[in-house]
Image: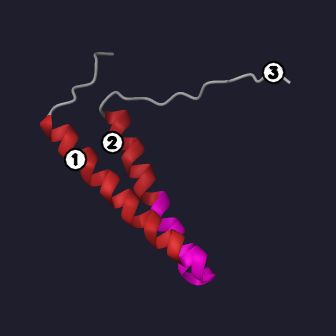
């Protein structure tokens, strides 16, 4: 696969997605801190949706996040 194109349009769209994620997480955090289970569930779903859209956007642009295994010495 070709190297991903990180142009101005990509940066602008990705910044929009980061802002949306930040806003969604703020709402989730407030619901958690307030002990508001009903809003927490709704806000969690909204935050998860934003994350999924961001990951799909990155994958479409050729940016993949592959998990790595790390070993820790005891």
Quarter containing the C terminus: top right
Which one is earlier in the sequence, the residue at label 2 or at label 1?
A: 1
Magenta run includes residue 26: no
Residue at the limit of the structure toward the front, as seen here: 74
Which one is earlier in the sequence, the residue at label 3 or at label 1?
A: 1
Give the left or right position of residue 17, taking residue 24 as reference.
left
Q: In the drawing, what numbered circle is on residue 68?
A: none
In the displayed structure, would residue 35 be above or below residue 54?
Answer: below
Relative image position of residue 48 (x, y in whole percent): 49, 58
At a point 39% along the width and 59% down the height, the residue shown is 22
Q: In the drawing, what numbered circle is on residue 57?
A: 2
Q: Which residues are magenta?
A: 31-48
Residue under pointer 3: 73
At a point 28% along the width and 18% down the height, the residue shown is 3
Give the left or right position of residue 44, taking residue 3 as reference.
right
Query: In which quadrant of the rendered view does residue 32 lie?
Result: bottom right
Residue under pointer 1: 13
Q: Nearer the viewer's eye, disc 2 or disc 1?
A: 1
Observer-nearest of 19 and 61: 19
Please rate how many residues cluster around mark 2, counting C-alpha atoms within 10 Å: few if below 14, some from 14 to 19, many from 20.
some
Q: How many marks?
A: 3
- How far apart, in angstroms, are the residues tagged by discs 2 and 3? 36 Å
Please rate how many residues cluster around mark 3, counting C-alpha atoms within 10 Å: few if below 14, some from 14 to 19, many from 20.
few
């Amino acid at each position: 696969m070709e190297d991903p194109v990180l142009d101005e349009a990509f940066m602008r769209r990705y910044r929009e997605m980061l802002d949306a994620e930040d806003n969604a997480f703020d709402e989730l955090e407030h619901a958690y801190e307030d002990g508001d289970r009903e809003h927490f569930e709704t806000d969690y779903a909204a935050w998860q949706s934003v994350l999924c859209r961001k990951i799909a956007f990155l994958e479409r642009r050729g940016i993949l996040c592959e998990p790595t295994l790390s070993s820790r010495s005891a």
